[in-house]
Image (cartoon, rainbow, N blue to C red):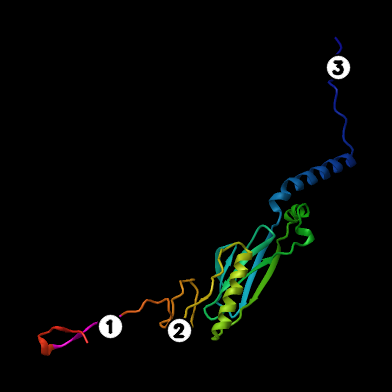
Amino acid sequence: MMMFDPPTLPRRSEGMSLMAEFRQCILSGLLLLPLAGGCVKRTVEITSTPSDALVWVNHVEAGRTPFSFEFTHDGTYDVRVAHEECIPLATQASTEVPVWDLPGPDVVAELIPVQMERVIEWHFELQPLVSDPQARIASAMKLRDQLEAFGLTHHTTPRVVDIPGDGLPSLFGGPKLPPSDSPSRPGVAPPPAYSPDRGGQIVNE
């Protein structure tokens, strides 16, 4: 009986072995790339003049200046700044998006094994309070208009009328009182005289 040796696989050449190892290294690197990838840190730094001002961002109390916070989404934020010695400020602030952080390229930035950082600076100048009543009223009306622009309040303009007698305006629109010498005002007769000498009788003169 004739015996046959089993067929053997062809031997790889040295070049083919190196190519296979290279492909395996590339594949392993691609699989480990998300684990070794960096991240993008986005931070907003808020300052004001004067400092120690209370700040609300999108109607949520964020902190007192100077401070910073991390954010995820770019866009326009509603900001309100208040200080005890200054006129409150209601405004908007936005974050400018660089090209590498736009949707699409940001995925590549997340995979790069380097931590990337964006710092946005917001600075607000506050106006000091004034002692002039008219100037304070004008500042309050300006703040009211700013809040209305953001849809945060609703108001009705008061109606000013004159009240005779004292010459002061009224913001409540009350009825006008006739003057004391007006013909439309009913006259009131003085009470009769009282004489103790006549036994407490009323004397009509």
Q: Is residue 73 above or below residue 182?
A: above
Answer with the quarter of the image where residue 27 lies: top right
Between 159 and 165, which is closer to the camera in this rendering?
165
Is residue 88 in sight in this rendering? Answer: no
Which residue in the protein does label 2 denote? 166
| Mark number, residue 190 | 1
Q: Is residue 129 left or right of residue 125?
A: left
Of residue 85 and residue 141, the one placed in the foreground of this image is 141
Magenta stretch, residue numbers: 189-195
> In the displayed image of the protein, which residue is found farthest to the front?
205
Left or right of residue 120: residue 187: left
* Residue 118 inside the magenta-drawn segment: no
Name which residue type carries label 1: Pro
**Residue at 74% across, 64% down:** 96
| Residue at the (72%, 48%) spot, across then down | 32
Figure check: 45 above or below 187: above
Numbered label attached to residue 136: none
Specify few, some or many for label 2: CA neighbours under 10 Å numbering under 14, 14-19, or 20 or more: few
- Marks 2 and 3, how far apart at CA: 130 Å
Residues at badges 2 and 3 in contact (C-beta under 8 Å)? Answer: no
Residue 100 drawn at (x, y percent): 78, 59
Of tags 2 and 3, the one toward the viewer is: 2
Asked if residue 13 lies left or right of residue 34, the reply is: right
The residue under label 3 is: 4
Q: Secondary structure at mark 3?
A: loop
Give the residue type that dot 3 points to: Phe
User: Residue 85 appears at what percent x and percent y?
Assistant: 53, 81
Q: Nearest the camera: 170 or 139?
A: 170
Q: Earlier in the sequence, mark 2 or mark 3?
A: 3
- Quadrant of residue 92 within the rendered picture: bottom right
